[in-house]
Image (cartoon, grey):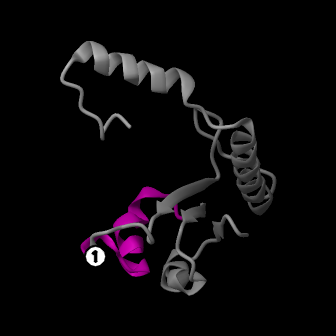
Amino acid sequence: FYGFMLFTDDKVGNYYKRFIRDFLKYKDEVFCAAGKIVLGLMYEDYVTRGNRLEVDGELVGGYSSLHIRRGDLQFKEVKFDSMTWYDNTKEIWKPDEILYVATDETKASFFEDFKKNHGEPMRFFND
């Protein structure tokens, strides 16, 4: 929101930014569903590592996640194939982490090259 709106009057801009901050919320069901996904990913990592869980300062860990958007991009130059995604992001996760991918890509085969190179489990919402 903040990146798409420009108000010429700072007072008006601050009013609407505070309004969005204070009143635009996801429903509890959305947060609960997301929490179940996170818990499932952390539990899978816990079991895979032999009942050992490594968490960060926010008590989250055991997986990395990517949001790969495919369907709603209007510029062809930002629609990458799966190997380009892999090459551009392979440095940001630990080698032994589960990788959760949130995507609007409908063809599961799109991620085959990515999976071959990643070598660790990849999980999707439909899993």
Q: Is residue 10 above or below residue 98?
A: above
Q: Quadrant of residue 102?
A: bottom right
Q: Which residue is mark 1?
A: 76
Q: Reply yes or no: does residue 78 show up in magenta.
A: yes
Q: Please name the residue shown 53% across and 21% down the image.
A: 22
Q: Quadrant of residue 74?
A: bottom left
Using the image as rendered, state which of residue 48 and residue 10 is in the foreground: 10
Q: Reply yes or no: does residue 51 show up in magenta.
A: no
* Residue range (magenta): 77-95
Asked if one can make out residue 116 in the rendered structure from this viewpoint, the answer is no
Q: Is residue 66 above or below residue 31?
A: below
Q: Please name the residue shown 35% across and 76% down the image.
A: 80
Q: Is residue 94 above or below residue 82?
A: above
Main secondary structure found in the magenta portion: helix
Q: Please name the residue shown 74% across and 48% down the image.
A: 33
**Residue 64, how many percent across, how many down?**
56, 56
Q: Please name the residue shown 34% across and 34% down the image.
A: 2
**Residue 30, how many percent across, how many down?**
69, 44
Q: Which amino acid type corresponds to the residue marked 1 in the rendered image?
A: Lys
